[in-house]
Image (spheres, grey):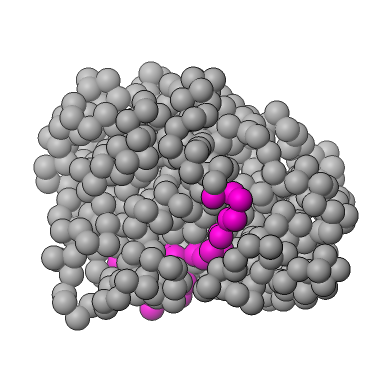
């Protein structure tokens, strides 16, 4: 039945990963007692179902039945049904019937992930890290195969470009990924624009494939960044500028309608770059907190209708319980984005896009929260303007996020009570990739043709004969790891 992953022979990791991992931009939030029970129940079900299928637990969990069984365990632990907020719409027989599981969890959608990350484990950024320090500490516990090369910092290989390619393009159904950047100074970037471009070239294999696109990082309140936009646009074929409004000198951020923000937008227009990707929500901490909120989005979207404002994380805040949107209620989280577009008369499906990186991964913990968050985004931002993003490699392969979204449904009760839409196949296809094709000017038929026989697809065909997904997550998992991550340039 194929060799077993040497790092997980006993099947100790679930294919749908619910844990406290963060992307390093927010302090990890421990999972709830319900989530702990869900994970425990998933392992118990995996044992039982593996025996019935005459498989080891690892072999069962690697299969589509393993993913289906895990999602069914999550439903059971949450005690959700189709009269509550949200649930994973998985048939019971999919836990044992591979044809049923494949029909529900496997798919042929065009998947365009607009937010990915990795780290150069040997980059110049390490020169700014003390020799005794362990940047991204805690990640060594991931024990990926690449970490076996030896050395005090060999664990950083788990976050490398090669592991990124494996997790994204081998172990998931992702077709295209946008490589983004973390908040940092130019000297402390864990991946430079030059390194990102080299990875893009490796992925394309000189066949013209657009599987990997890259952002240009800019913080206009940081010395030299505004001027640096010219080089990024002219020399590196970037698809967007990425900015962090809560980040800046001395920890002080800015609003997009402040002078630095307006200068950045106007410069992007002059350079012909029409996408501004801005981190909103997932606050770094209390300092400059207001700049992590979305009040400025509607203002600049109205002022610059020819610019696409792609709101990374959709303004989501992990410790805020999402509820029905009530105009003027002043709630934090996604509601700050909705209130801003309403206040500035920016209509749904116009030039404001809501991105799901880290947001969907966190919402998978709580189906009610997920139903409200997605329901509101579809209703107020627009069904054509919600974009798929996963923030991987911090969460490992995004395949579990893909499988969970393929099966998630908003209950009939929530649809009737709050005016939310049902998540049908057409809407899933839009979110997975068709929506992002518009601002990124990608023709999905062209991409399908380009990627059908490129090196990545050919390698994946061979790999799928004996897949070895790790089911690992790599981001900081507790407060200590998070503080170390921030202190050492993460």
| Residue 208 shows up from this direction | yes
* Image height of 234 relative to 17, above or below: above
When the figure is inspected, residue 269 is found, relative to residue 254, above or below; the finding is: above
Q: Which residue is more in the foreground, 398 or 366?
A: 398
Taking the spot 70% from the left edge, 28% from the top edge, the residue there is 426
Depth check, front residue: 343 or 54:
54
Seen from the viewer's position, the closer of residues 94 and 51 is 51
Viewer-nearest residue: 126 or 278: 126
Image quadrant containing the N terminus: bottom right
With 158 as the anchor, is 74 left or right in this view? right
Q: Within the magenta stretch, is there residue 288?
A: no
- What x and y, as percent, mark residue 45? 80, 70
Figure quadrant of residue 173: top right
Q: Residue at x 26, y 39 (%)?
A: 197
Q: Is residue 427 above or below residue 106?
A: above
Instruction: Give x and y (percent) for residue 359.
Output: 54, 51
In the image, is residue 483 part of the stretch drawn in magenta? yes
- The quarter in which the C terminus is drawn is bottom left
- Left or right of residue 141: residue 43: right
Rendered location of residue 166, percent (x, y): 46, 52
Q: Which quadrant would residue 264 be assigned to in this image?
A: top left
Magenta span: predominant SS is loop
Q: Is residue 154 above or below residue 310?
A: below
The magenta stretch is: 463-486
Q: Is residue 293 visible?
A: no
At which x and y percent is residue 258? 26, 37
């Amino acid at each position: 039945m194929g060799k077993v992953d040497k790092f997980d022979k006993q099947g100790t990791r679930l294919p749908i990963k619910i844990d406290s991992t963060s992307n390093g931009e927010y302090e990890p939030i421990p999972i709830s007692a319900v989530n702990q029970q869900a994970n425990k129940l998933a392992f118990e079900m995996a044992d039982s179902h593996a025996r019935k299928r005459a498989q080891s637990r690892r072999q069962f969990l690697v299969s589509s039945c393993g993913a289906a069984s895990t999602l069914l365990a999550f439903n059971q632990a949450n005690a959700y049904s189709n009269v509550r907020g949200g649930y994973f719409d998985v048939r019971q027989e999919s836990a044992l019937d591979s044809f049923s599981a494949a029909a529900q969890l496997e798919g042929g959608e065009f998947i365009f992930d607009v937010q990915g990350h990795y780290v150069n484990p040997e980059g110049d950024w390490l020169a700014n890290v003390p020799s005794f320090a362990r940047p991204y500490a805690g990640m060594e516990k991931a024990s990926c195969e690449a970490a076996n090369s030896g050395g005090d910092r060999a664990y950083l290989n788990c976050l490398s470009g090669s592991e990124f390619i494996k997790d994204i393009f081998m172990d998931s159904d992702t077709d295209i990924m946008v490589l983004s950047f973390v908040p940092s100074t130019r000297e402390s970037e864990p991946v430079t624009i030059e390194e990102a471009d080299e990875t893009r070239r490796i992925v394309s294999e000189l066949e013209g494939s657009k599987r990997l696109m890259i952002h240009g990082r800019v913080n206009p309140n940081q010395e030299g960044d505004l001027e640096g936009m010219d080089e990024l646009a002219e020399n590196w074929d970037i698809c967007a500028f990425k900015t962090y409004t809560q980040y800046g000198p001395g920890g002080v951020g800015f609003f997009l309608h402040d002078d630095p923000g307006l200068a950045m937008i106007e410069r992007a227009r002059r350079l012909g770059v029409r996408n501004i990707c801005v981190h909103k929500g997932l606050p770094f901490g209390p300092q400059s907190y207001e700049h992590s909120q979305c009040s400025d989005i509607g203002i600049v979207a109205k002022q610059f209708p020819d610019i696409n404002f792609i709101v990374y994380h959709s303004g989501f805040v992990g410790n805020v319980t999402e509820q029905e949107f009530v105009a003027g209620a002043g709630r934090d989280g996604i509601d700050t984005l909705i209130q801003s577009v309403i206040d500035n008369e920016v209509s749904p499906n116009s030039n404001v896009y809501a991105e799901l990186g880290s947001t969907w991964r966190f919402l998978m913990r709580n189906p009610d929260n997920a139903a409200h968050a997605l329901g509101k985004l579809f209703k107020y931002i627009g069904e054509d303007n919600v974009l798929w993003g996963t923030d991987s490699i911090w969460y490992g392969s995004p395949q579990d996020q893909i499988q969970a979204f393929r099966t998630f449904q908003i209950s009939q009760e929530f649809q009737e009570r709050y005016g939310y839409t049902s998540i049908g196949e057409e809407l899933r296809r839009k979110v997975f990739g068709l929506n992002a094709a518009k601002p990124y000017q990608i023709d999905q038929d062209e991409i399908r043709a380009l990627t059908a026989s490129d090196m990545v697809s050919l390698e994946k065909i061979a790999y799928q004969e004996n897949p070895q997904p790790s089911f690992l997550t790599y981001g900081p998992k507790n407060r200590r790891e998070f503080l170390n991550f921030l202190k050492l340039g993460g």
